[in-house]
Image: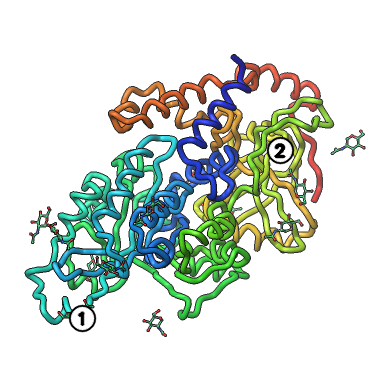
Amino acid sequence: MNRVVYGLLLTLVLSAVRGQNFWPVLSSNSLIALRSQRDVLSNISIDKVPVVGVQLNDVAFRGTSNETESLGVLASLLNVGVQAYMMDIEFDKSYNLTISGSNTSFGTTLSTIKRFISSTNNYLNADILVLLLRLKQSQNASTEGTPASYPNITAILDLYLGSSAIYTPSQLMYDRSSGNVAPSYGNLNSPDWPSLNYFLYSIQKRVTVFYVDTASSDALQSPVIFNSSSLNYKTSNTSITCPLTNNAQVLDMSNLGWRFLQKDFSSDDIGEYTRCGYSPIIDKNYSPDSIKTISNVLENSLLWSWAPNEPDTSDNARSNSTSLVARRCAVVNYTKSNSSSYWTVANCYDRKRALCKRDGNDFEWAVTQDSASYFSHHDQDGNGFCPENFSLSLPQTALQEKSLDNYLSQLSPDTWEIWIDLNSVSVPDCWVPDGPYASCPYQKEVSARNFVSMITPVSVFAFVTIVMLIMLSWRRVPIQDNRKRWKRVINSRLGSKAEGVPA
Ligand SMILES: *[C@@H]1O[C@H](CO)[C@@H](O)[C@H](O)[C@H]1NC(C)=O
Ligand SMILES: *[C@@H]1O[C@H](CO)[C@@H](O)[C@H](O)[C@H]1NC(C)=O
Ligand SMILES: *[C@@H]1O[C@H](CO)[C@@H](O)[C@H](O)[C@H]1NC(C)=O
Ligand SMILES: *[C@@H]1O[C@H](CO)[C@@H](O)[C@H](O)[C@H]1NC(C)=O
Ligand SMILES: *[C@@H]1O[C@H](CO)[C@@H](O)[C@H](O)[C@H]1NC(C)=O
Ligand SMILES: *[C@@H]1O[C@H](CO)[C@@H](O)[C@H](O)[C@H]1NC(C)=O
Ligand SMILES: *[C@@H]1O[C@H](CO)[C@@H](O)[C@H](O)[C@H]1NC(C)=O
Ligand SMILES: *[C@@H]1O[C@H](CO)[C@@H](O)[C@H](O)[C@H]1NC(C)=O
Ligand SMILES: *[C@@H]1O[C@H](CO)[C@@H](O)[C@H](O)[C@H]1NC(C)=O
Ligand SMILES: *[C@@H]1O[C@H](CO)[C@@H](O)[C@H](O)[C@H]1NC(C)=O
Ligand SMILES: *[C@@H]1O[C@H](CO)[C@@H](O)[C@H](O)[C@H]1NC(C)=O
Ligand SMILES: *[C@@H]1O[C@H](CO)[C@@H](O)[C@H](O)[C@H]1NC(C)=O
């Protein structure tokens, strides 16, 4: 069998695992794009990781009293990559916790989330989930009840979600004291959180749970739920600055962690709010019939990086200078007229300028004076042709992408394609930073024995995932084996040093 067949199989398996017919076009490209976006975030602190969320009561429960339908909507949202869930919960007459405005118990809802966590507990699919809780005290409960009769929410989370998946305040204290936190450049006031990579793979956590207000944390105390003091939770009636037009505003925003904005977003404005650094919480009433329309809003927020239908590696253009084609490298494609950029795939052998970032600063960019192939840029010690104290880099968050837009808007060209430090040279569809010799993290894990322990046992998904991983590592193309030879070819044609192209 050849690689086309494997590619097809992979696509089928992926869409069978995650696809839903009425949800945003979940092409294999957008799955790969979402995964690569997650991988690019891997050393970003979890409080700065952009996620997309919903107000669950409004989106899934308000429009129907059929529990099966509501939980089906929740399962679909999880599948398409919605990662934050704001829930209003309340006591019923027997002091059981329910989703406000419905008869569905909180525990049943958590079970749906737990099923999703188990089915995605592997390197390819694991990602962080954020649960945001608010306790609405119904009049009867608050007048008749005493805190002693309140349910033990810690026990409910243990039972229905599983304590092993939950990241707790005490674990955070431990991680801060032992230095397992991501460096946060230049904002010493903002407390540190661990990186996404550490969170998902080193301690194998999947969920953080917050109360969004102090009344809830006072009423239902729990050692596994973070209080609202870590959150920056904004609603539509708080005034915010967006769009961010200069770097001072970007830096102010970057100092805040866990930034959420709950609002009735439209498909036109949600992208801009995302680039302002907010994790949107979509707050709109849907019924099971109208829920399909949420996909327009999700499409414009789930991906802040790649253009629609990217990464598209299909080979339909020939490189001019060398006639070698390897559509395995990424550019940021900037359009001046609307000051916006997105990532697309380009031929690694094309000669372009490259993007540099100041070392130790997440928001200061430069573009090289020299144009060269992707490989030639990375021959220069990882600094490429960058100015002193700058290195080849890429925007790792939506906020960094925004600061890059602001920087590029000051420079002259109308449209620009600039190399970013992201390629799939090593393994197709596995997009990694750190130059063309960086290896694919999943590939490494296939050989590492501990990988199997990460996969939920007795699960069909485990088998499916192993098959997918084997395919991923089989689907190598000549570029890897022939890279040395290709480099020789290109070097002999171009001379080992690329020519400078003045600005
Ligand atoms: C709830 O929805 C499911 C799936 O749409 C349907 O099969 C079931 O009959 C509904 N139940 C009620 C009580 O309407
Ligand atoms: C409340 O919870 C208890 C124990 O979990 C259960 O036995 C009872 O049926 C629940 N009551 C309602 C109304 O769901
Ligand atoms: C909850 O259940 C009760 C009785 O089973 C019913 O009368 C009520 O309408 C239900 N509430 C909702 C929001 O479905
Ligand atoms: C509060 O209790 C009264 C009487 O017990 C009942 O009629 C009423 O429906 C309850 N209200 C709510 C919101 O549960
Ligand atoms: C609540 O549940 C947790 C875990 O199940 C348990 O450790 C704790 O003691 C309980 N708290 C109370 C007040 O019962
Ligand atoms: C929130 O939690 C932190 C540590 O977990 C604690 O220091 C702080 O006092 C709490 N804030 C409130 C308002 O409870
Ligand atoms: C904002 O709206 C919330 C409810 O959505 C309300 O509780 C709060 O008081 C409002 N705040 C202001 C400043 O209007
Ligand atoms: C490709 O080469 C042709 C002729 O050498 C030239 O006219 C054209 O501008 C080149 N295109 C690019 C994209 O470099
Ligand atoms: C970059 O954007 C321009 C304008 O939208 C488009 O013509 C060009 O093909 C894009 N480049 C790539 C590599 O996709
Ligand atoms: C900006 O303009 C380009 C080229 O016309 C277009 O492809 C892109 O979608 C636009 N971006 C936004 C955010 O409107
Ligand atoms: C580069 O960094 C070094 C060490 O921090 C500093 O001494 C030097 O002045 C910097 N060079 C430039 C051009 O900023
Ligand atoms: C995070 O990863 C990017 C891409 O590999 C790298 O450029 C950057 O230096 C890393 N940052 C830290 C703090 O390790």
- Pick the residue in front: 205 or 79: 79
Characterize the local packing of mark 1: few (<14), some (14-19) or many (20 or more) Cα atoms within 10 angstroms: few
**Is ligand 4 closer than 8 angstroms to the Cβ of mark 1?**
yes
Residue 51 at x, y percent in the picture: 46, 56
In the image, residue 244 above or below residue 364: below
In the image, residue 502 above or below residue 28: below
At mark 1, the secondary structure is helix
In the image, residue 476 above or below residue 215: above
Residue 94 at x, y percent in the picture: 13, 67
Q: Residue at x 59, y 69 (%)?
A: 244
**Label located before the other in sequence (2 or 1):** 1
Q: Quadrant of the N terminus?
A: top right
Which residue carries the number 1 mark? Answer: 139
Residue 35 at x, y percent in the picture: 50, 41
At mark 2, the secondary structure is strand
- Pick the residue in front: 23 or 7: 23
Residue 259 is at least partly visible in this image: no
Residue 346, numbered circle: 2
Colour treatment of the image: rainbow
**Is ligand 9 closer than 8 angstroms to the Cβ of mark 2?**
yes
Residue 182 at x, y percent in the picture: 38, 50
Relative horizontal placement of residue 224, taking residue 350 as reference (left or right): left
Q: Residue furthest top?
A: 1
Relative horizontal placement of residue 444, taking residue 218 as reference (left or right): right
Q: Residue at x 60, y 63 (%)?
A: 267
Residue 166 is at least partly visible in this image: yes
- Pick the residue in front: 500 or 453: 453
User: For the residue marked with disc 1, what is the amino acid?
Assistant: Gln
User: For the residue marked with disc 2, what is the amino acid?
Assistant: Ala
Q: Residue at x 32, y 40 (%)?
A: 118
